[in-house]
Image: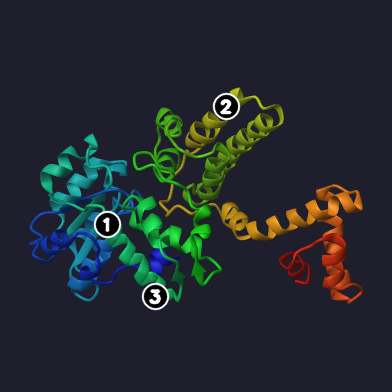
Amino acid sequence: MWVQKHRPEKLEEIAGNPKLVQDLKRYHWKKPLLIYGPTGVGKTSLINSLACELGFEIVEVTNENLDSAKATAQTASIFGGKRLLLIDNVDQIKDIKKVADLLKESRNPITLLTSDFGSKRLATIKKMAEKLQMRRPTAKTLERILQQICNKEDVIAEAGVLEKISENSAGDIRSAINDLETAAKGRKKISMEDLEVLEKRDKTSDVYKALSLILTKKDFKEAVTSLYDLDEQPKDVLLWIDENMPYIYTDKEDIWRAYEYIAKADIFLGRITNRQYWGFLRYVNTLMSGGVNISKKKQIRYSMYRFPSYLIKMSQTKKERNIRKTIGEKLSPILHASCRVIDKEYIPLFKTLLKNERINGEELMEKYRLGEEEVEYLNG
């Protein structure tokens, strides 16, 4: 993924937070460091760059190794250097008291990251740590980052494309890079039309925030209400959950339970389409949000959210589907067959006849009023 491939390796490569970078370069490490800021702003990349520059060995502390982390906090690395203990999403650690104990006993530097600075669970941590805020970069800064990535990937973006991606991401670097990679998938040139696959994010309530509440938190009510102000079609939200849930949930039974709710939500979506009764939507939203949320009983893993592969494929084949549709509309009244029959039976037949030179493109253009682009498509 481009987010990993183009991750900053030096502090000066960190975008949009020059004061924070300077503060880190001068930091004394006498106290643990709590860095807070919105999701996707680059907190983890910042710490990786910092550790690389200072020669620290990063040791990630999670729920699984929190008990054994005390020994790590007391010792140097195998090369004799300092270890930097990193606790990501510290507000989501189950036993926050153990984190506080670790901060008291550690002889190595500790950095804690959070996207929820207002969490009441962090009250003790805030008193013990130095606090630095990481802000979202401006759209112009993001545009420069995306242009640098395009240059490295030999991708040409038409005028306005990078600006549009930057504005849609609302300062979320990770989302902007993911959107750029999605739009550029299988292409060497990106136009405004290629951005149709990308979602239009609401700055206050976007699909990534909803996914976090549904897949990582344990609050049924929050999971359900996360969809209330989301500017997304229910079928698209279901695709987002279906795509990302298996990467977050680790237990097979949790995944099985979640798919049960996803399948039921899909059934009600089908009934809405067939009966045009939108009252079923209340069941769809509750099943795919709250149902999936209460399905997890075991430990989860944190992973970057993936854009639904189905939507990517639909975007990439949109032009082909439009051509097949126009061919069907032109052939249907002449061959007395439905557009569906034309698509399934006649288009493959004409492709074979053209390939074997039993007919030629000029005949098709003359007899069936097909255009050059349509004949080119049939010719492969």
Of residues 48 and 354, the one nearer the viewer is 354
Q: Is residue 179 shown above or below 351?
A: above
Tell me residue 140's x, y (percent).
28, 60
Residue denoted by label 3: 151
| Residue at (54, 69) in percent of width and height | 187
In this rendering, would 265 be left or right of 119?
right
Task: Measuring from the top left, give residue 196's x and y in whole percent.
Answer: 52, 53
Residues at circles 1 and 2 in contact by the CB criterion of under 8 Å: no
Separation (CA) of disc 3 from disc 2: 47 Å
Q: Give the residue displayed 42% in from the left and 66% down from the top.
A: 2
First along the sequence among labels 3 and 2 = 3
Q: Earlier in the sequence, mark 1 or mark 3?
A: 1
Q: Which residue is mark 1?
A: 43
- Which residue in the structure is indicated by mark 2? 283
Looking at numbered disc 3 in the image, what kind of residue is underneath it? Asn
Q: Residue furthest top?
A: 279
